[in-house]
Amino acid sequence: MTKFQIFIGIDISKSFFDISYYWNGEAIYLGVYENSIEGFQSFIADLSSIVKVPSNKWFICFENTGSYSKEILYFLISQDIPCLEESPLKISRSLGLRRGKSDKIDSMDICNYVYEKREKLSATILDHPTIIKLKILLSRRDLLVKQKSALTVSLKEQNKSMDKDFYQDLLNDNKKIISHYTEHIKLIEDKIIRIMKSDVQMFKNYKLLTSVVGIGPVTAAHLISTTNNFKKITDPRKYACYCGVAPFPNQSGTKKGKTRVHNMANKKIKSLFSNCAIAAIIHDPQLSSYFRKKTKEGKEYGVVVNAIKNKLIQRAFAVIQRQSPYVKILSYA
């Protein structure tokens, strides 16, 4: 039986948030508040005066809207008020067909969602501050890498028959900017290593992960950040689902389709493991033999590569669980 006495839904936008609470069998709209510390304090005071329930018996749910929802998340946790930053897709799919939409209606829908799912939901737990810093640095690095890549290919799309001096000037400008990005990416990567070195267990896990053939420093850092240093996700199958490489059956009655991966995934991690799989095929004798064997059997290239991604995830979690480096096997049995 849930320990909470009141369930609250919040719809958050950039400047404001709307609140509804579940009371006496229905969702009741409380009002709209400014998305700021003052607004958070106001809604707590207003709701406390109505329901007369201690705030540690509340359960608040709101959608993960990126930076817009983070301030209220940190505030509520600092006040020891249980809350859940939920996936917008989960809430949306639970509501079924809807007619009409407004911030008020959305807050009432979230309120009904959290009440109906009250026995299954659990409060959000903040990542360790080191993990939060790591995520910020990795996000910054990804942004710079994308911008560098865009500049690298941009002039290739231009018509090289244009004035040669003009084209060379653009090319020289690009090289200077790309060099600047390269320098800053290296600085961020150095900061990432320093951040991980500040936590003994985190850096040990990083070294263990990079012992797996195919898993490089960036993928290892992303593995640590997305699993909260392997405290939030401990099952390799669940992580494979999270990054979209776990195959699922596709059948109904007598109809049988191909086993496929699902489109809902962390696409960044999935792309990293694609690169890892290619590197492992080249440098790991066991996986290289596996790849040749399966392709000779007629397996599709993508299916075999996906299987290798799963093997790498299994190896990553195995070295963490046993706390010893990966030992390379010379050939596939």
Image: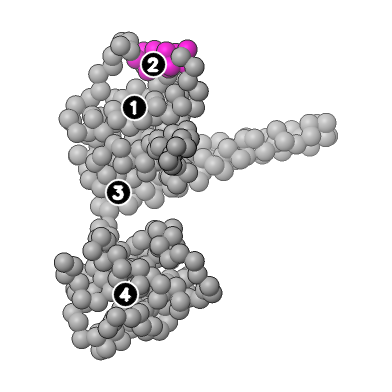
Residue linked to disc 1: 311
Q: Is residue 261 visible?
A: no
Decide: marks 2, 1 in contact (CB < 8 A)? Answer: yes
Local SS, label 4: strand
Within-10-Å neighbours for mark 2: few <14, some 14–19, many 20+? some
Q: Is residue 267 above or below residue 317?
A: below
Question: What count of labels does the image hold?
Answer: 4
Give the amino acid type for the residue marked by disc 2 in the picture. Answer: Tyr
Q: Magenta stretch mostly in which secondary structure?
A: helix
Which residue is under mark 3? 131
Q: Which residue is mark 2?
A: 290
Separation of residues labelled 2 and 4 (CA atoms): 52 Å
Instruction: Please report the residue visible at 50 percent of the width from the left and 46 percent of the height from the top.
Output: 143
The residue mark sitting in front, 3 or 2, is 2
Q: Residue 308: x, y in percent?
A: 39, 25
Mark 1: secondary structure = helix
Is 295 one of the magenta-colored residues?
Answer: yes
Rounded to the nearest angstrom, the CA distance separating label 3 from label 1 is 25 Å
Tell me where the magenta segment starts and ends, as one range. 285-296
Q: Residue at x 21, y 69 (%)?
A: 80
Q: Quadrant of the C terminus?
A: top left
Q: Amino acid at mark 1?
A: Lys
| Three-letter residue code for mark 4 | Ile
Q: Going from the N terminus, do you reach mark 1 or mark 4 first? A: 4
| Dot label at residue 8 | 4
Circle nearer the N terminus (4, 3):
4
